[in-house]
Amino acid sequence: MKTPSVANQYAAIGLNSVGRCLSMMDRNPLSPTFGCANREYWLARSTDFPSAIAQYGILPMALAYSEPFENNIYYKQPKIAAWLAAGMSYLSSIQHKDGSFDEFYPNERGWAGPTGFLLHAMVAGWKAVAPLLDVRDKERISTTMLRAAKFLASNDEVGVLANHHAMALLPIAETMELFKAHHLEPLYEERKKVFLDVCYDEGWCLEYDGVDPGYLSATVTFLARLDQARPDPVLLDVAKKAIDFTKYFVYPDGHYGGTLGSRETFHFYSHGYELLGHENPMALAQADFMLKSYAAGKSVTPHLQSDRYFVYRIPEFLFSARDAAPRPEVLPSLPWQENNNQQFLFPEAGIWGGRRGNYYAIANLARGGVFKCFRLNDNGVEGGIPLASDCSMSGIMPDGTVFTTAWCDPDRNFEAHGVEANVHARGLELHTQTFDPFKMTVFRAGMLALGWHQKSAYHLKGLIRKVLMLRNTTVPVQLHRHMKLSPEGFVVTDRITVAKGTRLQRLILGEELPVRYVPQSRYFQPLELEVSGRELTPSELDQLKGQGEITFQRVLS
């Protein structure tokens, strides 16, 4: 039996953004772009192609149409059904012949993002309105779905994103079950094996070069939904292990994940935790605490996100409302709520931390020693305040090169023993690229000339991803960080070294400062107002230049 108050809280958050979702769509049946959900294309005319991912709005529309949530004005509304069908039909019209879709640029031919997400949305849309479709639309949309499923099952992408692999498996399985497409079975099993190869016994899955708690919660959700469509104990076990790992990233102040992760994402996907919470109270402990944080404005909800991505968040709340699990009278304690002194270390992930007295700290040693530290409330279980959200060190070299030590350096150099940890982090160059009119013209011409071919498009996207997200070039700056947790607080000693005679332009230490290009990161969180780092003064930069090193010690208490 559902817990009404929990279900209603989820539903209220999701339904609050459905109107915005509908505003993105061309709802005029006389328009040639009827059903297009990319408002910047069909109305503002500020882009030269329709981004397919905007059609992911099909999923929240399908849920709002199909489920009798409290105060749901969209439930079984004929106009919603018509717009939903139009959105699916328009999506069919912009699909490539190989089954793929474009999100960021023409001829992108994206894999799980966007094709996997869009197929997942179409499955929900099909279930909602298939009986209302005429024969021709049924044939066209089902062909689109089967073509997308084959593309997902037959391809991959450059750079490992485990949540994308889970999101490929989910709609392939849903489509196979919906249309009895058993010819996809061998390809599905190949994709499953690839996914399992990037999952670790510690309970996390690889996102580029490390663990990202935000996307790990998404992986939990996608696998839990997959289990609804096609039960698989092996995949479900990955989700169960992940739930026992993500509990360390539900922070006392109500935030989740963030800059500790390889992709710096704050979002918490609650649906999988509600589904698995029927048997695992720890899943509900995390979901319950995060539900309270939504009410306090301390996690990512749809209203914070850009027009491109807010549609991703709406279904999460509506699914969670539909499948909210009953709460036991007493939920298990989160790690920071446990009253005993405790430590944890996940050496493969590089995650280390614990609680001592009224202090809770957690660090990603594999990512330059980024860490968060909290002072707990007097009872130690109701919450706490952040003392630091430290993104290691970033700065600017004499020649203008921007660098950071907050990176999953393949040259891992860290150790942890009990309450102490040491990190040696190299400075790595950050590559930021923006378009001007000339660059955009050349880029568009290149994609039109080469992107028509699937393999060329694959290699071009891989090159873009390497330039923006994966390329590592070292600079001659290093950070040696020692951390110690005690009942009196958290002590951090940083020794910064450079080649003597090097006068850095700027150097920022210990600030909440995300550095990686990830479209679903960098949303404002109140945490940013509560913590601060320090920028080295001109005299300190001169000292660093003259001596080749400088040391700072902080006592967070």
Image (spheres, helix red, strand yellow):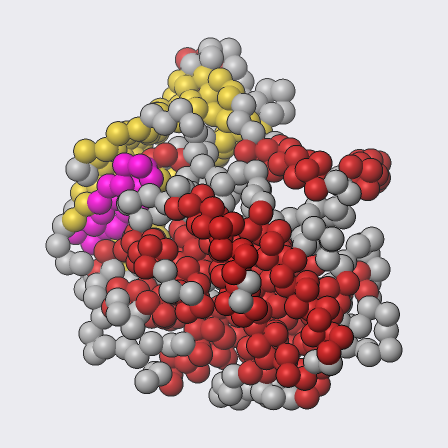
Which of these two is toward me, 89 or 63?
Answer: 89
Toward the viewer: 451 or 417? Answer: 451
**What residue is drawn where x is 53% and y is 38%?**
159
Q: Is residue 453 magenta?
A: no
Left or right position of 142 against 415: right
Q: Residue furthest left?
A: 340
Q: Residue at x 65, y 88 (%)?
A: 77
Q: Position of residue 194 (x, y in %)?
A: 45, 43
Judging depth in this view, the residue of 157 and 63 nearest the camera is 157
Residue 454 visible in the picture: yes
- In-image side of 179 versus 84 (left or right): left
Q: Find residue 55 and report its horizontal and vertical position in percent.
A: 67, 65
Instruction: Examine the image and state in which quarter residue 94 appears.
Output: bottom right
Q: Quick check: is 357 in the magenta stretch?
A: yes
Residue pictured at 21% horizontal, 66% vertical: 332
Q: Which region is colored magenta?
A: 344-363
Does 21 appear above or below 479? below
| 282 left or right of 264 in image | left
Residue 417 screen position, x and y as percent: 19, 33
**Residue 351: where, in percent of width, then height?**
31, 41
Left or right: where does residue 321 sit relative to residue 145? left
Q: Is residue 207 above or below residue 407?
A: below
Q: Quadrant of the N terminus?
A: bottom left
Q: Is residue 532 visible?
A: no
Residue situated in front as seen by the camera: 368 or 296 = 368
Instruction: Determine the image quadrant of residue 53.
Output: bottom right
